[in-house]
Amino acid sequence: MASSSLPPLKGYNNYGVYLREKFGGRRVFKVIVDAGFTCPNRDGSKGYGGCTYCNVDSFTPELPRSLVAIRAQIEQGITRAKENYDAEKFIIYFQPNTNTYAPLATLRALFDEALSICPQDVVGLAVGTRADCLDSDKISLLESYTKHLMVDLEMGMESIYDHTLLTLNRGCNHQDLVSVLNQLAKSPLSLCVHTVFGFPGETRDMMLAYAHEINRFPQIKFVKLHHLHIVTGSIMAAQYKRQPFKLFELDEYTDFLCEFLPLLRPDIVIQRLFGISDLKLLIAPNWGLKKVRIQSHIDQAILRRAVCQGSQLASA
Ligand code: SF4
């Protein structure tokens, strides 16, 4: 694992490097599973319509969402990753919607089934959820898999400001996340928080303050950083059409990351630096580059400017 005593490769703790070091140089890929969950702010228990920026179809490839059986999704995902990327080991990733929003017995059955497929090649389980859809039984279930797997529990932080979360129809507040993070302070789960930069009404300084908030929790091991993008089918798409608002250009977002990363604790591993959306659904900002070119653009700027994750912490 990349450690805070070593200068981070690429100027930041890169998830790909982390996985290679953790799993003996093997090529590890995530295989996305859509188990058909919904969200409490979609089904009416907390609200309807979902978070305003969300179209759940936008963050997964078409194949998983078009299949029903999780066995078929996993087998096909593994085959594809082996054939196209020479993948050797896999993390089963329950991604779309809220993947702990079901009774405990249902969750156990789903996770057990997923992990029974190709167990010799599966090294991890990742579960994306909301902090308000976890309880001690569900946490214990997830922790039980850590005996033989890396278990990554990914929770949406999105914004640290309740007035933003309210505007976004998140149906939960920042304290919901803080409470679960505190509950998980000694957990063997690998905790990941998911943030979005660029929500209307948030200034650059407000966004930079996310780093200080994340740093407060040593139990946070991973982050996924995203820029706000507007996707077809979301409530925000209609809002944006009615009244367009400022979104990050690539160079602006790169500048922002170059300011943000030095404020972030150096031991945190960064799974993602920018948002990714199905181009067919993306309305704005369209930077006109494929994912690898965006990654390379940002990485090159980080190297050129000698940005170093955590370097500003002493003076921050
Ligand atoms: S962002 Fe997450 S919690 Fe919000 S509606 Fe989409 S899937 Fe549900």
Image (spheres, rainbow, N blue to C red):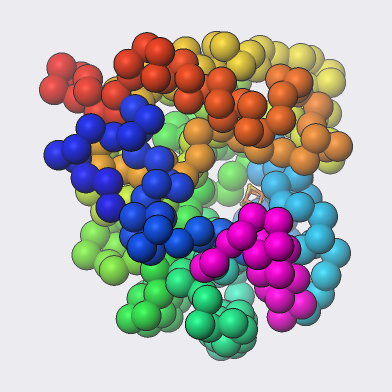
Query: Up-down: is 60 above or below 198?
Result: below
User: Magenta segment, principal secondary structure?
Assistant: helix
Residue found at x 51% / y 40%: 272
Side of 91 relative to 76 (left or right): left
Q: Quadrant of residue 201?
A: top right
Query: Up-down: is 63 above or below 231?
Result: below
Q: Quadrant of residue 236?
A: top right
Can residue 289 be seen at all in this image of the molecule?
A: yes
- Is residue 84 shown in magenta? yes
Which residue occupies the foreground of this view, 76 or 140?
A: 76
Image quadrant occupied by the C terminus: top left
Residue found at x 66% / y 38%: 276
Query: Up-down: is 37 above or below 272?
Result: below
**Residue 66 locus on image (x, y percent):** 85, 64
Q: Quadrant of residue 108?
A: bottom right
Which residue occupies the foreground of this view, 11 or 239?
A: 11
**Residue 184 locus on image (x, y percent):** 29, 62
Residue found at x 81% / y 75%: 68
- Is residue 42 shown in magenta? no
Can residue 180 be seen at all in this image of the molecule?
A: no
Q: How many marks?
A: 0
Identify the magenta region: 71-89
Residue found at x 37% / y 80%: 148
Side of 249 relative to 172 (left or right): right
**Residue 103 locus on image (x, y percent):** 58, 81
